[in-house]
Every structure is written in structure tokens, then in C-alpha cells.
Image (tube, coloured by chain):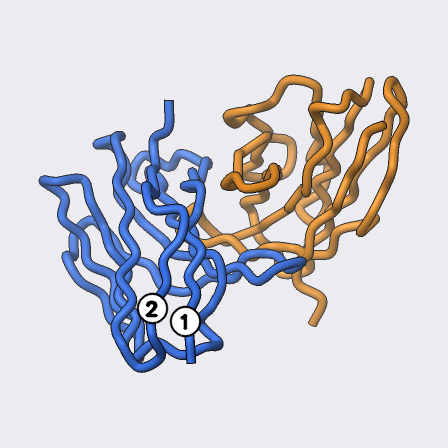
Amino acid sequence: NAGVTQTPKFRILKIGQSMTLQCAQDMNHNYMYWYRQDPGMGLKLIYYSVGAGITDKGEVPNGYNVSRSTTEDFPLRLELAAPSQTSVYFCASGKAVTEAFFGQGTRLTVV
Amino acid sequence: DQQVKQNSPSLSVQEGRISILNCDYTNSMFDYFLWYKKYPAEGPTFLISISSIKDKNEDGRFTVFLNKSAKHLSLHIVPSQPGDSAVYFCAASNYGGSQGNLIFGKGTKLSVKP
């Protein structure tokens, strides 16, 4: 029972590089989320999706892009990595906004 | 501006005693609230939730209380156990408005001492 799977678990990027953080869920959830957690801080919502083909900005969307072409996948794209994007990224999914099941996280360092 | 606030960054409690974690919110449109628990190097895991039509929800050792007029909720853990040591996040959503966003507070680190 995989749940929410995030890849990679760790990544080091150079400033200006781009990458995609992958997120897949096998629970047929409509709602999916991307959060970032900076050291000593809470979870800040980057983007969310209420279903395939529908995405919306959260609190801190700048520097990121998402797509939701299928129910299962919700990749997060960083186009021009900056040191301020060093963080732990969590993907989550749920049947409704009343729940969220989280992945294990991706620890990203931009140097 | 923070919509969900957890003003205590940390809390230390003796094993067997009660732990009370607090959360305040500013958005009156929030109508569903959740508590999550997070261990280091893991994703948050769901603990307990409450709808705005209730003022209390209980699940084993965990009880969440909601005071809508004060825009305040609290999580009570009784009795506290060393395994409860983790960071606890409060989250809120506008379920009735079918909004998709789930907003989290900054978390409170609970330490339960044996």
C-alpha cells in the first residue's frame, strides 16, 4: 500500500538549475497539495489541485509551477533554482479538503 | 499574514500528565480543523479533526476542543507518553466553501519526559 510517493528523497541543485519533484498517489484522491517546510517553520502551501486539470496557487507559489494531467500525479517544477528554495518539500493528497495524507518529503538544497 | 497561529513553539510535559496544545485562527470562513503529528525526517500524519458544527471531538487519548467565538482550538493529550514527543501542527480549511487549500500553523514541539 504505497500511499503518497515522493521522488527523489534528497537533491542538491546549483543556482539556476531546474528540476521536477515527483509526487504520485494510488488512493484515487482528487485533492493534492505541495507544501514546503523551512527550518523551524510550519508548512507553507505552494500549490494545490482539486482534480485532474485544475491547479491553484497557495501562499508561496513564486518560482514554482505544477501540472495535474492525471489523478495520480502532481509534479512540482522549479525552473531557476535559488538558495531561498532550499527546504523540505511535502506532497499530500486527500479525498476532500478535510484530510491530507503526506509523503515522506524531498529535502532540497540549492547551492 | 498568518491565518493559523500556534504561538507556543515548544511544550515540555511529564509522562502521565496532560499536554495541551493551542491554535488560533483568523479566517472566519474556516469550518474544518485538523491536527497533525510529525516526527523528524517523516511526513506529517493525521491525528484528529473537528468540524465547526461541533465543539469537541475525542479519539482515545486525544481530544480536540473548538471555541468558534474565540477562533481558538486546542488539542489535549491525556495521559501523555514519551512516544507523543513530536511536532504538532494545527491546520484549517474552508470545507463548506469547497476551497481546496489546507492552511497549517508553524507547529508546536512537544517533549514528553519520562
Q: Position of residue A53 (x, y in %)?
A: 64, 31
Q: Report the quarter where the C terminus of chain B lies.
A: bottom left
Q: Position of residue A73 (x, y in %)?
A: 73, 45
The colour chain B appears in is blue
Q: Would you say B101 lies left or right of A75 here? A: left
Residues A69 and A75: in front is: A75
Q: Label 2 near label 1: C-beta < 8 Å?
A: yes
Residue lying furthest left: B69
Q: Would you say A96 lies left or right of A56 here? A: left
Disc 1: which chain? B
Q: Would you say A77 lies left or right of B110 here? A: right
Name the amino acid, label 2.
Val
The correct choice, above or below, for B33 with respect to A85 in the image is below
Q: Would you say A111 lies left or right of B1 here? A: right
Disc count in the image?
A: 2
Residue placed at 82% from the left, 48% from the top? A10
The correct choice, above or below, for B12 with respect to B24 in the image is below
Chain-order first, disc 1 or disc 2: 2
Q: Position of residue B24 (x, y in %)?
A: 26, 41
Residues A68 and B64: in front is: B64
* Circle on res. B40: none
The colour chain A appears in is orange
Name the amino acid, label 1.
Val
Residue underneath mark 2? B13
Disc 2: which chain? B
* Circle on res. B112: 1
Q: Secondary structure at mark 2?
A: strand
Q: Report the quarter where the N terminus of chain B lies.
A: top left
Q: Can you tell which quarter of the image residue A37 is in?
A: top right
Marks 1 and 2, how far apart in space? Answer: 5 Å
Q: Position of residue A79 (x, y in %)?
A: 81, 20
Residue placed at 49% from the left, 63% from the top? B86
